[in-house]
């Protein structure tokens, strides 16, 4: 089947995914939001542009969403000028956002009611992997729908895990992000504890970064504190806070006692509440350092 691919949300991750879809020969239509630069680069590479969601829905058989979260996804899918009101039966919506599984279930039911299909396929990786086509995808989909979209997802994902029914992809993503955001909070507090006791960042990193506690997440996280690289780990505090709220919603919905998850969420809520939501996750180490009377990374490296 020749699929016409739409893509809404060509930001840090979506732009690279779009380029890989074009490289694999898929007809791609994109839509601008606030920043036109990635759209222009994709148009130069061969994509077409839709003026709005309605236009895209009427002309695409598979539509990727890579937006902030469930409120944005719901508006795109359920709005009067949205996908369900304007697309043809059989259209597949692939939500690559980190969304609330409770919302995903409701959207799945709404799509089925009009003869369309929802797939949740949140991402694992960074913009670097998005650009090289080496992301991971955690997919929730009916078997027949997964078989249809798997070759399309493979254009940008090197590792595709079909986890089962719709909603399990977003559930797995929240579990993954709970672990990673928990790491970030733990790394930040441990680093401040070490510094407050008289150890340097370099000494801390020399031991932790060469031992069993090292992992890929640790490596990118520590590039800020060690090297002052603001682009090593492009994930904002506000997005992390949103994901931890969704994880809390999931725990509540399942009746799961998760006290540690609540503590992790509180770290991101604290930064977000004081206007630091735009900062990247590794900068939590500076937030906690400042609260404990220690210099930030910029002050320490620039003195």
Image: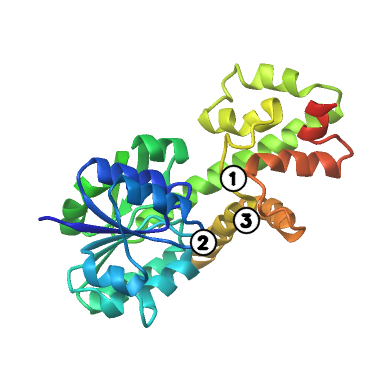
Residue to which mark 1 is pinned: 181
Whichever of labels 1 and 3 marks the residue nearer the N terminus, that label is 1
Residue to which mark 2 is pinned: 34
Query: In the image, residue 232 lies at what x, y percent?
Result: 57, 34
Q: Indicate the secondary structure of the residue bearing disc 1.
A: helix
Q: Which mark is residue 238?
A: 3
Quadrant of the image containing the C terminus: top right
Looking at this view, name the residue that lies furthest to the right.
293
Query: In the image, residue 74 lies at what x, y percent?
Result: 42, 72
Residue 124 in the figure: left or right of residue 210: left
Report the Cα–Cα distance between label 1 and label 2: 27 Å
Name the one closer to the observer, 73 or 19. Answer: 19
Looking at this view, name the residue that lies furthest to the left.
1
Residue shown at 36% from the left, 41% from the top: 136
The coloring applied to the image is rainbow
Query: In the image, residue 157 lies at what x, y percent?
Result: 31, 41
Report the Cα–Cα distance between label 1 and label 3: 12 Å
Q: Indicate the secondary structure of the residue bearing disc 3.
A: helix
Residue 297 in the figure: left or right of residue 37: right
Name the one closer to the observer, 173 or 52. Answer: 52
Report the Cα–Cα distance between label 2 and label 3: 18 Å
Residue shown at 70% from the left, 51% from the top: 267
Q: Is residue 241 visible?
A: yes
Name the one closer to the observer, 44 or 300. Answer: 44
């Amino acid at each position: 089947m020749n699929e016409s691919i739409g893509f809404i949300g060509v930001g840090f991750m979506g732009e690279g995914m779009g380029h890989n879809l074009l490289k694999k020969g898929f007809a791609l239509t994109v839509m601008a939001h606030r920043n036109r630069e990635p759209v222009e680069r994709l148009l130069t590479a061969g994509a077409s542009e839709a003026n709005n969601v309605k236009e895209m829905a009427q002309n695409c058989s598979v539509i990727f969403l890579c937006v902030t979260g469930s409120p944005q996804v719901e508006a795109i899918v359920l709005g009067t000028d949205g996908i369900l009101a304007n697309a043809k039966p059989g259209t597949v919506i692939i939500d690559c956002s980190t969304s609330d599984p409770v919302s995903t279930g409701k959207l799945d039911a709404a799509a089925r009611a009009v003869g369309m299909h929802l797939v949740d396929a949140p991402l694992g990786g960074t913009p670097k992997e998005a650009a090289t086509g080496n992301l991971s995808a955690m997919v929730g989909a009916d078997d027949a729908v997964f078989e249809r979209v798997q070759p399309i997802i493979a254009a940008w994902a090197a590792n595709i895990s079909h986890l089962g029914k719709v909603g399990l992809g977003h559930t797995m993503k929240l579990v993954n992000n709970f672990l990673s955001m928990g790491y970030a909070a733990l790394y930040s507090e441990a680093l401040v504890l070490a510094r407050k006791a008289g150890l340097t960042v370099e000494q801390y990193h020399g031991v932790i970064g060469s031992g069993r506690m090292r992992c890929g997440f640790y490596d990118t996280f520590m590039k800020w504190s060690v090297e002052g690289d603001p682009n090593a780990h492009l994930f904002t505090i506000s997005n992390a806070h949103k994901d931890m709220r969704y994880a809390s919603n999931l725990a509540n919905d399942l009746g799961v006692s998760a006290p540690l998850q609540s503590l992790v969420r509180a770290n991101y809520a604290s930064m977000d509440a004081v206007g630091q939501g735009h900062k990247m996750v590794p900068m939590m180490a500076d937030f906690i350092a400042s609260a404990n009377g220690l210099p930030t990374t910029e002050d320490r490296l620039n003195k």
